[in-house]
Amino acid sequence: MSVQAAAIVPTLPGRYYCDPAIYQLENERIFGRLWTCVGLAVALPQPGDYLTTELAGEPVLVVRGQDGELRAFLNVCRHRGARLCTEPCGRLETRVIQCPYHAWSYALDGRLIGAPNMRDAAGFSPAAFGLVPVPLACWEGMIWVNLQSDPPPVESQLVPRVVERLGDRETFERYRIGELRIGASVTYDIAANWKIVVENFMECYHCAVVHPELSQLVPSFRAGYAYQQGIGATFAEGVETLTLTGKRTRPLLPGLRPEDDRKYYGLVLLPNVFVNLHPDYVLIHRLEPLGPGRTRVVCDWLFAPDVVESPGFDPSDAVEFWDLVNRQDWAMCERCQQSMHSRAYVEGGIFAPIEAHIRRFNDWVLAQLGESR
Amino acid sequence: MSVQAAAIVPTLPGRYYCDPAIYQLENERIFGRLWTCVGLAVALPQPGDYLTTELAGEPVLVVRGQDGELRAFLNVCRHRGARLCTEPCGRLETRVIQCPYHAWSYALDGRLIGAPNMRDAAGFSPAAFGLVPVPLACWEGMIWVNLQSDPPPVESQLVPRVVERLGDRETFERYRIGELRIGASVTYDIAANWKIVVENFMECYHCAVVHPELSQLVPSFRAGYAYQQGIGATFAEGVETLTLTGKRTRPLLPGLRPEDDRKYYGLVLLPNVFVNLHPDYVLIHRLEPLGPGRTRVVCDWLFAPDVVESPGFDPSDAVEFWDLVNRQDWAMCERCQQSMHSRAYVEGGIFAPIEAHIRRFNDWVLAQLGESR
Amino acid sequence: MSVQAAAIVPTLPGRYYCDPAIYQLENERIFGRLWTCVGLAVALPQPGDYLTTELAGEPVLVVRGQDGELRAFLNVCRHRGARLCTEPCGRLETRVIQCPYHAWSYALDGRLIGAPNMRDAAGFSPAAFGLVPVPLACWEGMIWVNLQSDPPPVESQLVPRVVERLGDRETFERYRIGELRIGASVTYDIAANWKIVVENFMECYHCAVVHPELSQLVPSFRAGYAYQQGIGATFAEGVETLTLTGKRTRPLLPGLRPEDDRKYYGLVLLPNVFVNLHPDYVLIHRLEPLGPGRTRVVCDWLFAPDVVESPGFDPSDAVEFWDLVNRQDWAMCERCQQSMHSRAYVEGGIFAPIEAHIRRFNDWVLAQLGESR
C-alpha cells in the first residue's frame, strides 16, 4: 500500500472576501435563504420581550408573545414604514407593538389591532396590514429565522452538521444548551469578511503561533489539530476547563457524562454560529456580517441556571480566557482582510494539509452562490 | 346620493427615498430645473454681502451688487476652477470677488475685471470669462435661483401654490414677509430623504401622537386636520400664538387683519420651503437635500423690524416651541428613512384618508421625474 | 518676422480630477505601469530595515537584504494572504519576514524558508511560494518600484526629464542626493487630486498672490516665472538660501560649484516626485494618491551627512519656510478640487500664457491613459 501525501488545496480567490457584488450575492443566497441565528431564546423570557437585528439588510424584530411563543417580523410599520422598535432589545410592557408615528398598533402576534382614522377608508382590511412575518424556530436554545416564506425545517439544516462534526447527536444534546443562562456577553466589531472569521475558527494550524495560552491547555491544539471528527480536544494533564488558570471553579454542567469531563468541543453551525462546549460552560459565537470587510461577533457565555443565580457568581475566568483568544484571532483575521484585493491573492492562497477540511466550507459557499471552481 | 368612503392611497415605493439613482434624477429634474429657495434677501442687506450654497451639486454664490441687486453665479473661478468664496456667508468689503489663487477678479455683477498676465494671451476676451450666471429672483423676501438658463418667471411656479393652499393671494401677502427681519435661525441635519420631511409637514395625522404641545394649542391638529384649504388652523380658547405658553408677547404683524388674529397657516412651496404664518411672527423652513437619506433644514424666525430692533428683544418663546416640534418631527422622519430599503416597503405603505392629499405631492414628484404610477 | 502672442490653453476637463473611473484608470496605466518613488534609500540603512506602502492599491514591502540590496515584494503571505508587515517602517531584527498567523517565514530576498506542517503536502514546492517580487531600482538616493513584471530601466524614465528641465544631467548630479541624510520629514494629507498638486508646483503664476515670503526671496517668482529651462531661479540681493530669514546657516552642499551658490532649482519627476535643490539642502516632495480627491505628500529635507551629525543640528529654518509655502499651496489645491465636479468646469479652465507649459503635463496624462484631446 502506498502512502499518499495530502494535496495542496487552494483557498477561494481574494475577491470572494472583498467584492461588494459577491457580498450582496451572499446576502441574497446565503443569509437571505438559510436559517440564521439572531440570538438566544433565554434572553427573551417574558411576553413582550424583544430583540431587533438586521439580517441580509432586512430589519427583523423578534418578540415573545402572550402565549409564550417567539415570533419574528419585519420591523416596519405597514402604514408609512417607520421602524417600530429601535433598541437592540427591551420589553414592551403594554404587550402591544405601537408605532410612535401615528399610533398604529400591532398585537405581539403581528395582527393590526389599532389604526386611528382608518374606519372611513373604503376597502381597508386590517387583516391585510399585519406585520410581515418571518419564519422563526428555536433549536437548542438558539433563535433561528429564515427570510424565505416557506423554508424547510430548521433541523434539516443543523442536525446533519452536528452529526457530521461530533459523530452523533447525543454528545451535543447532553449540554442542554436550551436550559442554560447567559452569564456574560461581549460584542466585537471586526474589520474582516465573515468567511475569514469562519475559516479562522475552523483550523488550529495557527494555535501554536497565535494562542500560546490556549495551546498550553490543549496539547492537540499546539500540534494544530482542531477538527478531528467526533473526539473533541482533551485538556492537558491537570487542566480542568478553558480558563486562564486551567482550573474549574464550577460543577460540571448537568447532564454531562464522565467522559465529557476534560474535553472541549468546538463546532461551526453554518452560516453564522460557533458553539464551544466545555465541562462547566458553553460559549456561543454569533456572526453578523455588516459588509464585505466587516463582521460583528456576539459572544454569549452560558452557565447552569443555579450557577448564574448563586451569590457571588463570577464568569470572569471563562470570559477573560476567551476574550484573549478572540482578540488574538480577530487581529489575524484583519491582517488577512487587508490583502484580499491584492494581485498577490487574485487566485487565493493555499490551505496546508492540516487545514484541508476548510475546502469543504469554501465549496459550500460556492454551491450556495450557484458557482463552482 | 351615495356616501363614498375615501380610498386607500399607496405611498411611493421605498426606493424613491433611498436609491442614489433616483436622488440623482431628482437633482437633475427637480432641483436642477425648478426655482429653489437658497436664503432670505434680508440676510444680505449691503452691496458685497454674499451667501454660498450647493444646489443639485452645483456651488452657488449669491451676492448683492453695487446697484443693490442680488445676483447668483456658479462659485467657481473661470481660470483654474478655484472655489471663490468658502464661507457660508460674509461681506466682500472691497466689492470685488477676487480669486485667492491667481488674483483673477470679478465685479459684483460677474464681469471679469482683472486677470494678471493675460494681456499677451492671443484672442483672450475677458467678456468670455465672466462668472457663470445663475438666474435669480426675489419673491416675498425669499431668494430663489434656477439652474436652467432660461427659466419661466418665479411667480408662475409659486403663486398657484399659494392660491391653491390659501384660496387667494391676499392672505399670504398680508404677512409682508419681505419686510420682516430675521430674529433667530436654527439649522438641523436630518437623516432622512427630503420627501419624507415634506410629507411629514403636510399631514397632522401624527400630531396627537407626536406633538402633544402643539395639539393642545390647536384643536384641529389634535384631530389630525392640518391641510384644509383656505381656512387656516384656529387656536384653542385663550391661545394667542404658537409658543410654549400659548401667549403672545408681541403685537400683531403690521398689515394683518382682525381675522388673522388667532390663526396659524402652514404651507409648502415646492420644492423646498415651508412657510408658517402666525399672528406675530413667520417661520420659514428651507430644505437642502444633502443625499438620498440626508437633509439639512434651515429655520428662520421672522419678526417686524421694530420688534427685532426693540431693546430686550427675545424670540426664544417662538424658537423654543418650534424647535421642540421640529425635533419631534425629525425623529419620526428618521425612523421612516431607516426602513425604506426593506422588502416590507418595496411597494411602499399607505396614506390614511386624512393624509390622502399627500398623494398629490407624490404624483408631482413622479411627474417631475417623467414617471407615472 | 511677426510677433505671435501666446494662445489660450485649455486645462483638462474637471472630470479628470474627480471621476473615480479616471482615477482607477490612472492607477492602472500610470502608477501601475511607471516607475514610482516609494521612499529614500537612506531611510533603510541596515539589513532587515523595511518600509511599507500602497502603490496603485497594491501593498508593497521594501526591505534591505543580508547582501545590502534593497528589494520590493507584495506585502502578502502566500499561504492565507495575511499582511506581513503592518508598520510604515521598522527593522526586522531576526532578518526573517515571518507571518504572524501561521509562522510561514521568508528570507529577506523573498524565498520561503519555513512553512510548518507542509512537509506532507504532495507536490508542495517552497520555491513556488516565495514572496511576489516587485521590480525596484535606486536612482539618486530614491527608491523606485514598478508593478510591471519586466519594466524598462528606471533611467529611461527619469534622466530625460532631468535633461529636459535643467538642460543637462550634471547640474542635478552635483547635488549628490544619494549621499545626503534626512534631517526632517513632514507628511501632509491634502483634499485634492494628485494632478492638481503637480500643476500647482509647476507654475509660479500664483506665487506673488499666495507666497509673499517666497516671492520676496526669489524675484522671478514674484513675476510668475518658475519654469524656465536650465537657468534655475536666482535669489534676491542678499538672500543666501530659502529660509524664513533668507540666510544660510550651513555650508554649501559638497560638490556644488560657485554658480550654484545663489540658485534654487525645482523640478518634477513624473509621476510623483518634486525635487527642490538649494545651496545647502535638498527637499523632496513625494506624492501618494489616496483617491480621486485625496493625496498624501511626504516631504523629506536632506542635508550633508556631517551637517546632520553635527552637535546642535537644527533643520527648522528650512523646514518652517517650506512648511509655510506647502500649506499655502495645499489650501489653493483644495479650493480647486472643490469645484472640479461643477458644470462651470465641465470643459475645464484655461492656463495663462505663463502657465502654458502645464499643457505638456496634461497631454502626458492623456497619452498615458490612451486618450487624446
Image (spheres, coloured by chain):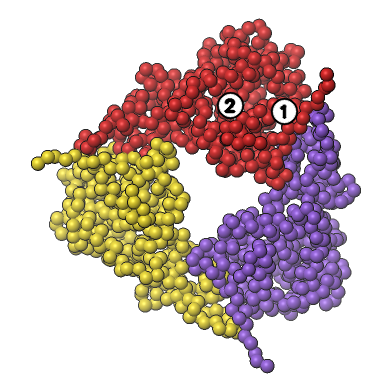
Chain colours: A yellow, B purple, C red
Q: Which mark is residue C270?
A: 2
Q: Nearer the viewer, residue B370 or C326?
A: B370
Count up the numbered dots. 2
Against B293, residue C61 (above or below) is above
Whether residue A179 is visible here, answered yes or no, is: yes
Question: How packed is label 1: few (under 14 Cα within 10 Å), some, or many (20 or more)?
Answer: some
Inspect this view and state whether residue A286 appears: no
User: Residue under circle 1?
Assistant: C356
Is C345 above or below relative to C146?
below
Q: Quadrant of the C terminus of chain B?
A: bottom right
User: Residue at the location (45% across, 55% down)?
Assistant: A24
Q: Chain ID for label 1?
A: C
Residue type for callout 1: Ala
Locate residue B63, reporting x and y percent.
81, 48
Asked if badges 1 and 2 are on one and the same chain, I answer: yes
Task: Decide which of tag 1 and tag 2 comes sooner along the chain.
Answer: 2
Frontmost residue, A202 versus C182: A202
Amino acid beneath label 2 = Leu
Q: Residue at x 84, y 51 (%)?
A: B70
Which image quarter: residue A7?
top left
Picture quarter with the N terminus of chain B: bottom right
Residue C66, image x, y percentages: 36, 19
- Residue B330 place in picture, x, y as percent: 62, 63
Q: Residue at x 86, y 47 (%)?
A: B65
